[in-house]
Amino acid sequence: MRDVAASYPGAASFGQGTLGGALTLGGPLRDPLVSGQLGGVLSSEQGTFDSRLTLAGHLRRPDVTARVQASGSSQGALYAETRGLDPARPAGATVRVYGSVQTSAGHVQADVQGQWPRLGGALTVKTASLPDPLTLRGDGEGGYALSAGQLGQGQLTLTPGAGLVPTLAGQLRLSPLALVAGHRAKRPSPPLSAAP
């Protein structure tokens, strides 16, 4: 597969560019092996992003590595690695996401790892639309602390669900008026609960 357009008229798109790559299958038919790489370069108002996805191992539960390298008006790189990922039963797969990217819209910094969805580490997002950075910090046991400065805070729990999406539960204490320029909220709103 080479030079496949990344955008189509009337369809959602992340930018202009092309995608391509090649995958090779081998081994026994019941449990084939896969190796290869997919990727491409996308250009948008936020910059140019060179993406690469590499697969290796058993087709049903491959090892996957991904990289997004930013250039132009954006700088930095994000990396992701998984080991033994079964898309139908992803719970327990070893995951790591790390790196940082700076764009005109904000900054993302990640360093999380563990067995999905029980990850440890932190993910921080800074944007002009938020008064303070938003940080999600995992304890490695499925618990996540959310901190957004003036906007509020919360505690979340992720447990294995059906397929790739985990079950979410927790509480959030938000102060929406913090989004209004010049306003500093004194009291957070009553907690919002998220349940399965």
Image: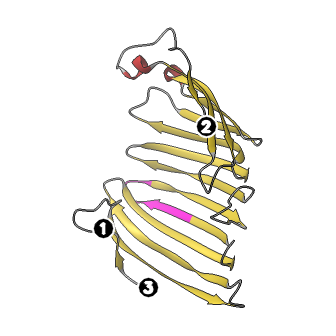
Q: How crowded is mark 2: few (under 14 residues within 10 Å), some or many (20 or more)?
A: few
Q: Which residue is drawn at 65% across and 41% down?
A: 122
Instruction: Identify residue for label 2.
Output: 196
> Left or right: 57 with respect to 131?
right
Q: In this view, does 180 lie above or below 108?
A: above
Cα separation between marks 1 and 2? 36 Å
Q: Is mark 1 on a helix, strand or loop?
A: loop
Which amino acid type is shown beneath numbered disc 2? Answer: Pro
Q: Residue at x 34, y 63 (%)?
A: 43
Give, as a three-letter code, the residue at label 1.
Ser
Taking the magenta stretch, the answer to whether it contains residue 69 is yes
Where residue 16 appears, as percent x and y from the top left, is 31, 66
> Residue 1, labelled with which disc?
3
- Look at the image and tell me whether residue 72 can be seen: no
Q: Which dot marks residue 139?
A: none
Question: Which of the two labelled residues, at mark 2 and mark 3, occupies the earlier sequence position?
Answer: 3
Q: Which of 60 and 174 is in front in this view?
A: 60
Secondary structure predominantly adopted by residues drawn in magenta: strand
Read off the residue under disc 1: 7
Outermost residue on the right side: it is 141
Identified at 55% across, 78% down, the residue is 37
Viewer-nearest residue: 137 or 33: 33
Mark 3 and mark 1 lie on one chain; the one further toward the N terminus is 3
Q: Disc 1 vs disc 2: Cβ atoms closer than 8 Å? A: no
Element assignment for label 2:
loop
Between the residue at mark 2 and the residue at mark 3, the CA separation in whole angstroms equals: 41 Å
Question: Quick check: can you spot residue 94?
Answer: yes
